[in-house]
Each structure stands twice: as C-alpha cells, then as structure tokens.
Image (spheres, rainbow, N blue to C red):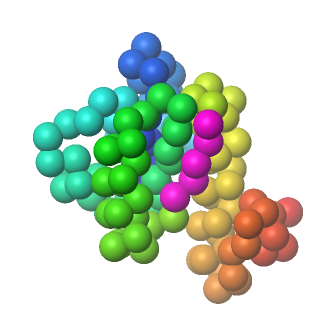
Amino acid sequence: MSIVLVGGHDRMHSEYMGICSKRGHRVKVYTQMPAKFGKAIGSPDGIVLFTSTVSHQMIHVAVKEAKRKKIPVFRCHNSSGTSLEELLLKLEATASCVATGKQPMASAHACGLA
C-alpha cells in the first residue's frame, strides 16, 4: 500500500519511514512543502496528515488533491510514531473494507473486520 505522510518533524523522517516499511507500506514523507507539491503527491492509497506540525498551505494542497483523486485522508494532531501506527491500522482497515466491498465507516473496525 502506498502512503503519503504530510507534516511531522524533520528529525522523525527516518522513523516514519521505518514504521511504514515495517508494516509493508511504501511511503513518501513531506515535512516541508516542496515545489509542485500537488504533483508530488501522486496517487497513493491514503494520505496521513499530522496537523500540528504542518502549514495550512500544505494541508490545503493535500486535501484538494485527495478530494480530486478520491484518496482517503487520515488526520492526527499528534505527530508521534505511535500516532502513525494507529493511523496505519485505520488505513489498513479502510482498505480492507473497500477490497471486500463493504462500506468503510468512521471506526477502523466498523466494517466488521475485527
């Protein structure tokens, strides 16, 4: 599964990469806004936003691209490794719901997977 992580701390970049790769995900981490950020996002399976450590402009661009491409967005105010692991569980549950044809809901396990 491919994931774009927006926000977080620069010093946690490698930890974010490690957490995602340990769970078998490909991840792009953007802690700062690059040029042409909208195009850099691509078409991931999900976008994770750490809202406390990201500029409003980055959030705006990421959410706009997500709506345009129908990509699920998961937000968290905290930018810790544990928060990322919890969001990955929700993302995986949502992807499983979609793959089985069930309607994902607000809860990570609302589609009856666990």
Q: Nearer the viewer, residue 33 or 16?
A: 33
Tell me: 75 left or right of 11. Answer: right
Task: Work out whether residue 51 or residue 43 is closer to the camera in this orientation and state it.
Answer: 51
Q: Is residue 82 magenta?
A: no
Where, by quadrant of the figure, is residue 84 drawn?
A: top right
Q: Residue shown at 66%/34% (left/top)?
A: 83
Question: Is residue 76 shown in magenta?
Answer: yes
> Which span is picked out in magenta?
73-77
Left or right relative to 64: residue 80: right
The answer to whether 59 appears left or right of 24 in the picture is: left
Image x and y of residue 107, in percent: 78, 63
Residue 68 location, x and y as percent?
Answer: 34, 73
Above or below for 110 versus 33 = below
* Residue 60 % position (x, y): 36, 53
**Between 107 and 14, the one nearer to me in the picture:** 107
Q: Residue at x 31, y 54 (%)?
A: 61
Residue at the top extreme?
11
Q: Quadrant of residue 101?
A: bottom right
